Image (cartoon, helix red, strand yellow):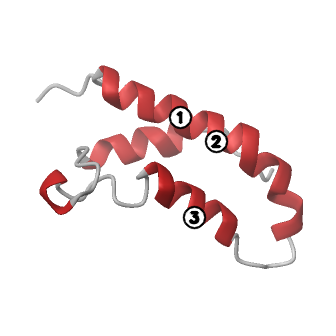
Amino acid sequence: MDFQLTSEQRQMVATVRAVTQDHFKGRALKFMDGTFPWENVKELARLGILGMTVPRNTAASGFPCWTRHWCSKKSPKVAS
């Protein structure tokens, strides 16, 4: 099995990294009180992150499950 990221997967990882830095990081403090970050969830849904491992024939991204792992590992921790 080839675990090299495709160009489409690399773009998804870069997009997630950019969104976390450009949008989520600035909003992190307002969610420290336990408020659920619906704004962040809506942004992830808009980008197709939430359904990324659901098959394409269901109108989702259709990425292999390990792409989600790369997106979470390669994105900076914004609320630290």
Identify residue for label 1: 15
The x, y position of residue 48, in whole percent, is: 41, 52
Residue at 47 percent of width and 49 percent of height: 47
Mark 2 vs mark 3, CA separation in Å: 12 Å
Mark 1 vs mark 2, CA separation in Å: 6 Å
Identify residue for label 3: 42
- Residue kind at label 1, given as amino acid type: Thr
| Secondary-structure class at tag 2 | helix
Residue at 32 percent of width and 27 percent of height: 8
Q: Is residue 54 above or below residue 18?
A: below
Mark 3 vs mark 1, CA separation in Å: 15 Å
- Residue kind at label 3, given as amino acid type: Lys
The earlier-in-sequence mark between 3 and 1 is 1
| Secondary-structure class at tag 3 | helix
- Position of 41 compared to 2: left or right? right
The x, y position of residue 73, in whole percent, is: 52, 40
- Position of 41 compared to 57: left or right? right
Quarter of the figure with residue 51: bottom left
